[in-house]
Image (cartoon, rainbow, N blue to C red):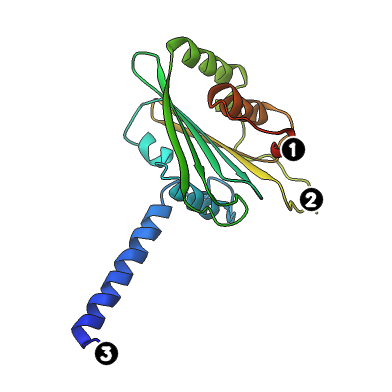
Amino acid sequence: MPDRAGVRILVCSIFLVAATLSFGQAGFFADGSLGKDNPHPDWYSKHLNALHEPSLWESSKTQKAQTYRFLWLRTFHHPIAIRLDVKPYGNSLLTTKISSGQGGYEPGRLIRNSTRKLSKEQTAWFLARIEELRFWSLPTKEAEEPNVINLDGAEWVLEGTKDGDYHLVDRWSPDKGAVHALGIIMLIDLAKLKLLYQEVY
């Protein structure tokens, strides 16, 4: 049986671990950015933590770098995050991460973490799509139909930072529109993921 000093150390250790985990999940999104009383920020943060992703909202406070991230949380499929970091010379780095869990449940552990360089031309093409689809003018949330409950599906979450600004767009299983188009561009055109038709929802 541990003595009192041992118990005190154990309790302090548990507290520090809990505080670390809590801090790790905080700071991904501004309070209220997804709407009042919306439980999604904790859900998204949990998955971003498991994917070992940085907080773009926090980085936008001190950095002017241009970055875009697509977080794809499908109920029954592996969570995916794709991040494009634009570099000063016009090229970029594309990072693709996948965890072993399911988007509607526990995130699991990181099972893929790959980064590759995109040329200036590839980067410029993507940034042109960002402008063409007016990402920076899209509303964070769309008005939801009354008395409609979303069950199985997918969260499509797009974030962007540019010149110290931060923008977040969140959609539930879009089958068209700007968020769907940008998500598909990042998944297929940039990350080159091979997806079956039934896996895209």
Above or below, 61 relative to 41: above
- Please tell me which residue is depicted at 19% across the width and 83% down the height of the picture: 5
Rounded to the nearest angstrom, the CA distance separating label 2 from label 1 is 28 Å
Whether 10 is drawn above or below 23: the answer is below
Q: In the image, which disc is placed on residue 52?
A: none
Question: How dense is the environment of label 3, judged by Cα within 10 Å: few (below 14), some, or many (20 and up)?
Answer: few
Whether residue 70 sits left or right of residue 63 in the image: it is: right
- The residue pinned by badge 2 equals 146
Q: Is residue 29 visible?
A: no
Q: Position of residue 195 (x, y in %)?
A: 65, 32
Q: Secondary structure at mark 2?
A: loop
Res 87 visible: yes
Q: Earlier in the sequence, mark 2 or mark 1?
A: 2
Comes first in the chain, label 2 or label 3: 3
Q: Nearer the viewer, mark 2 or mark 3?
A: 3
How far across and down, in percent of the image, does residue 79 sit? Answer: 56, 45
Check disc 1 and report its element: helix, strand or loop.
Answer: helix
Figure check: 152 above or below 181: below
N-terminal of the pair, mark 3 or mark 1, is 3
Q: 109 or 178: nearer the eye? A: 109
| Residue at 40% across, 60% down | 22
Q: Amino acid at mark 3?
A: Met
Tag 1 residue = 198
- From the viewer's perspective, tell me whether residue 106 is left or right of residue 9: right
Q: CA distance from mark 2 to mark 3?
A: 58 Å
Quadrant of the image containing the N terminus = bottom left
Q: Amino acid at mark 1?
A: Gln
Q: Is disc 3 placed on a helix, strand or loop?
A: loop
Quadrant of the rendered image containing residue 179: top right
Q: Count neighbours of disc 1 (C-alpha within 10 A) and say few if under 14, some if 14 to 19, many if 20 or more.
A: few
The residue labelled by disc 3 is: 1
